[in-house]
Image (cartoon, grey):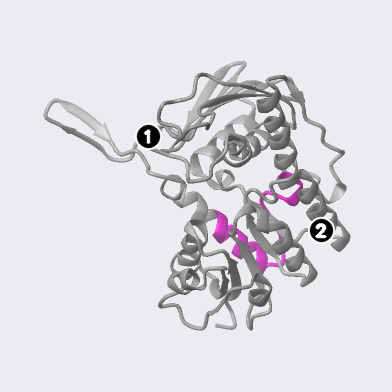
């Protein structure tokens, strides 16, 4: 196994267990060397049948485990800062699921720590950059054949929200994907955000402000609107339409198998993000493994993770105040030139 990249996976929940499976069965050039989760039984279940892997309750112990050369962080967001800093201290390359760090202050500390290392170590897991439809849309916009982008219309729907999901999390957890996708597709920073709420759906838990309509302004004068509805009840849907000066293009309408019978037609709607973006996750992790083995870091950067946290925090303030809220980002450090574009 010496020629395989040994990866420590931190977190063995829904996302972490799927990454363990992916590294073991889908991705080439890597192996699961260690897994850490406070629920050791869950971690053991995730690695059942995988040889030469150690299981740990503590993340730092996993980073010190034999054969660990890189880290995939799939633990809850509040644990990311400590894990990222620990990986940086050991000079370990990282793929960190979003949000990089939920709070801008913590995200800034992570960025400053990487800047002190003088080189990129972390890729942030905004997997839509690896989705085939989003990549085609990005290429189309970069080509310029449709003229300048004027608007992005986005939809983000979940079947139901998990226990403990808050109104703020619609923005700083769910819409964080649209924040990064908009920055990446348009090559522009987001400068202001306004949140408008219809009446809450009867399908939403008591007190949850769901759905929400989020409007972003960009430095180039484009507008980005997002319908986020995390208790729609019928499936997981993500769409994005770019409206440009000379045309429009939309992704996310893939329906898979269409079944026609007894005078009607229907198709499956994905149940969650692991189904809808399975191929994107596969491409993302494979690209990370390949780059890491070359000694490179590609994909969304720590700057992109920090920018998403700052924009999301402004969005939460806009939700609470009902007012248009400016996004205040510092100048982009030179280490991250070109990322997010």
> Among all residues in the image, which is located at the extreme front?
206
- Can I make out residue 256 in this image? yes
Q: Which residues are magenta?
A: 284-304
Query: Is residue 286 highlighted in magenta?
Result: yes
* Front position in the image: 232 or 164: 164
First in sequence: mark 2 vs mark 1: 2
Q: Main secondary structure of the magenta part?
A: helix
Q: Name which residue lies at 75% across and 24% down.
A: 325
Determine whether the residue tagged by mark 2 lies in a helix, strand or loop.
helix
Q: Where does residue 231 sit, x and y in percent of width and height?
A: 44, 34
- Can I make out residue 153 in this image? no
Assess disc 1: are there few (<14), some (14-19) or many (≥20) residues with their C-alpha within 10 Å of its C-alpha. Answer: some
How far is the residue under mark 2 from the one under mark 1? Answer: 41 Å
Q: Where does residue 318 sit, x and y in percent of width and height?
A: 70, 26
* Front position in the image: 63 or 166: 166
In the picture, the disc for residue 114 is 2
């Amino acid at each position: 196994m010496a020629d395989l990249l040994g990866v420590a996976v931190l977190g063995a929940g829904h996302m972490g267990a799927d990454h363990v499976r992916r590294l073991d069965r889908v991705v080439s050039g890597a192996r699961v060397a260690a897994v850490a989760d406070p629920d050791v039984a869950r971690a053991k279940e995730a690695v059942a049948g995988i040889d030469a892997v150690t299981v740990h309750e503590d993340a730092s112990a996993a980073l010190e485990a034999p054969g660990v050369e890189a880290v995939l962080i799939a633990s809850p967001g509040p644990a990311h800062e400590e894990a990222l800093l620990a990986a940086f201290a050991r000079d370990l390359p990282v793929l960190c699921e979003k949000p990089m760090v939920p709070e801008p202050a913590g995200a800034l500390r992570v960025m400053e720590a990487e800047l002190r290392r003088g080189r990129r170590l972390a890729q942030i897991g905004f997997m839509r950059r690896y989705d085939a439809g989003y990549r085609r849309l990005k290429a189309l916009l970069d080509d310029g054949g449709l003229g300048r982008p004027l608007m992005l219309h986005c939809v983000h729907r979940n079947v139901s929200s998990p226990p403990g999901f808050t109104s703020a999390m619609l923005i700083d957890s769910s819409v964080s994907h649209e924040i990064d996708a908009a920055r990446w597709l348009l090559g522009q920073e987001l400068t202001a955000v306004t949140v408008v709420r219809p009446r809450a759906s009867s399908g939403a838990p008591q007190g949850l402000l769901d759905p929400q309509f989020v409007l972003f302004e960009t430095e180039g004068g484009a507008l980005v609107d997002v319908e986020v509805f995390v208790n729609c009840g019928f499936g997981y849907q993500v769409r994005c339409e770019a409206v440009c000066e000379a045309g429009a293009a939309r992704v996310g309408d893939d329906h898979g198998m269409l079944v026609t019978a007894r005078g009607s037609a229907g198709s499956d709607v994905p149940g969650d993000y692991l189904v809808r973006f399975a191929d994107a996750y596969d491409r993302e992790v494979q690209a990370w493994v390949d780059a890491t083995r070359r000694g490179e870091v590609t994909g969304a950067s720590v700057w992109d993770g920090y920018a998403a946290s700052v924009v999301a925090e402004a969005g939460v303030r806009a939700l609470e105040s009902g007012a248009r809220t400016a996004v205040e980002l510092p100048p982009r450090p030179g280490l991250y030139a070109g990322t997010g574009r």
